[in-house]
Amino acid sequence: MASSASASPTIAVRNVSKTFDTGTHALASADFTVGQGEFVAVLGPSGCGKSTLLRIIAGLIPFDRGGEVLVNGEPVTRPRPETGVVFQTHNLLPWLTIEKNIRLAAELRRIDRAELDAKVRAMFKLLRLEGFEQRYPHELSGGMQQRTAIGQTLVLGPSVLLMDEPFGALDALTRDHLNVELLRIWQEQRQTVLLVTHSIAEAVFLADRVLVMSDRPGRIIEDFRVDMPRPRNPQETKGTPRFGEAVLHLNKLMGVV
């Protein structure tokens, strides 16, 4: 069930390793591509370098000499405007309303006021947060806060979305709900998505492909194609034999069963 990516990938990671100044060898020769509009998940044990890999692609930390990271064919040496990042913990400012939080980064980039107003209105509709524009973060549920954090990134119009365990701190029911919301948003916007997760079921439900990493130093040990049709919904998709087989295969690969 291995997969080959497109000839002109949106993300290309070639022979990327990372050793921190502390001597920790986090990544070893990571090598993969992600095609335009693909949704790819990254699975692996804790401490295997998943988040490190994501931060390297985002241009937030450097990697060792000898490797290469490209986004839209351009080398990554710093954060790029077409790349958006969503972290596990939201970065909402508690003294700003939800609308002002969503607008903040776009205003710092000096996006035209009329254009931004239209984008923000559309974003509240997309995120299903209409009516909460003037609320403050502490007045929202955890799921709504995380949707707002996603909105902060999406309003900038990224073509590439990097997500580092965005639902990891939420309860199981809220997480499942936001999985469905994320799929709906992706189907409308079609960004190229790379999602780091610890949840095998989440990876199978959301992704076109799942990259499985080894223990540290992290290597890609399998590029698994999720052979299930889209659109997907929890009731139909999770009840199919293919879903169960995919989850079982990845569990075995990661030594869970």
Image (spheres, helix red, strand yellow):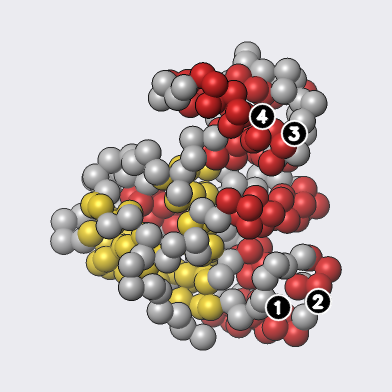
Instruction: Give the residue type at disc 3.
Output: Leu
Q: Residue at x 31, y 63 (%)?
A: 13
Front residue of this view, candidates 72 and 62: 72
Front residue of this view, candidates 38 and 169: 38
- SS assignment at label 3: loop
Query: Which of marks 2 and 3 precedes in the sequence?
Result: 3
Q: Residues within 10 Å of mark 4 (few under 14, many from 20)?
A: some
Instruction: Give the residue type at disc 4.
Output: Arg
Q: Quadrant of residue 32?
A: bottom left
Query: Which of marks 1 and 3 precedes in the sequence?
Result: 3
Note whether 69 is above or below 111 in the view shown: below
- SS assignment at label 1: helix
Note whether 171 is above or below 9 in the view shown: above
Residue where numbered disc 4 is placed: 121
Which tag is nearer the camera, tag 3 or tag 1? Answer: 3
Which tag is nearer the camera, tag 1 or tag 4? Answer: 4
Which circle marks residue 239 in the picture? 2
- SS assignment at label 2: loop
Instruction: Give the residue type at disc 2.
Output: Gly
Q: Position of residue 228 (x, y in %)?
A: 65, 78
Which circle marks residue 129 in the picture? 3
Determine whether label 1 and label 2 are within 8 Å by CB: yes
